[in-house]
Amino acid sequence: MKKLGWVCLLILSLVLSGCGGEETSSGDGGKVYRVGIDTTYPPFEFEEDGEYKGIDIDIINAIAESQDFKIKLSPLDFGGIIPAMQAGELDLAIAGMSITDERKKTVDFSEPYFDAGLTLVVKKGNKDIKTIDDLKGKTVAVKKGTTGATFAQEHADKKGFKVAQFNDSPAMFQEVANGNADVLIEDYPVIAYAIAKNDPGLEIVGERLNGDQYGIAVLKGENQDLLKKINKGLKELKENGQYDEILKKYLGESATQ
């Protein structure tokens, strides 16, 4: 019985040591934080030649270097990022995530690192849609789990349009370019970059629909030390000019918050 008890204790110890926490150890004794990203979201996050690139990737890498911690990037569908954090599979997320009151119920955000905003996008040459008031009877494409999707759902009944949801931005862009949906709602910098780089047959119309800000997220009430490091690193990037250089690299111009 005593021998069996020791075996049970050993098994229990192994199980507990394998349970997920906010961080795991790297080979050199540092800390490795698991970072949720969405690689279908250029210029913030995308995969090119087998590497993850973009504004968000450069920012989180620079913060990690500045604050002396390591990261492991974990690509997911955007809608699955917060659930993965709740399940203990991620420590933080940087994914062009807009700071909203609804998300604040689940996560704590860093200081804002980018001013975005939603915009309407139509097939090139479409002259029928200029504002949200022109959407009656139309089909509006959105990406699942985004503020664009929330905005569309909140206004669909009042404005009289249907909402079609997609898992990623390229599929949403294609739906409008093919004429299967009349208009899409997307973050302005994302669609501006896509149009400039790939010419998907789309154009931006009207004024921005809101004034979103992006933040880096950790699970609410957890990883507060990490959140402090993120804010400190973000402040340093802005003060030393590295932040502006990152934006210039992908957007073609310097910007300040």
Image (cartoon, rainbow, N blue to C red):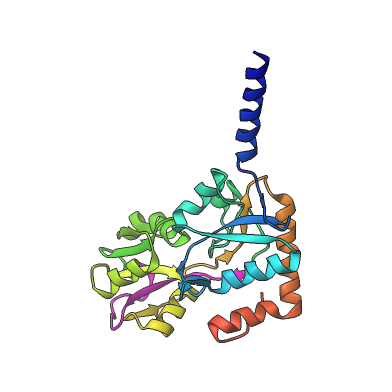
Query: Quarter of the image holding residue 235?
Result: bottom right
Find the residue positioned furthest to the top.
1
Toward the viewer: 128 or 107?
Answer: 107
Toward the viewer: 58 or 31?
Answer: 31
68 to the left or right of 186: right
Instruction: Tell me where residue 49 appears, x and y as whole percent.
Output: 46, 76
Find the residue positioned furthest to the front.
3
At x 69%, y 49%, the residue is 223
Q: Quadrant of the C terminus?
A: bottom right
Toward the viewer: 21 or 42?
Answer: 21
Q: Is residue 198 magenta?
A: no
At x 66%, y 80%, the residue is 244
The magenta segment is: 114-133
Measured along the vertical axis of the image, is residue 174 above or below residue 82? below
231 to the left or right of 175: right
Q: How many labels sit on residues?
A: 0
Q: Quadrant of the N terminus?
A: top right
Instruction: Tell me where residue 148 appears, x and y as whole percent.
Output: 44, 62
Find the residue positioned furthest to the bottom.
252
Instruction: Tell me where residue 95 appears, x and y as whole percent.
Output: 53, 63
At x 55%, y 86%, the residue is 252
Instruction: Tell me where residue 29 appears, x and y as whole percent.
Output: 73, 55
189 to the left or right of 129: right
Toward the viewer: 173 or 102?
Answer: 173
Q: Is residue 125 magenta?
A: yes
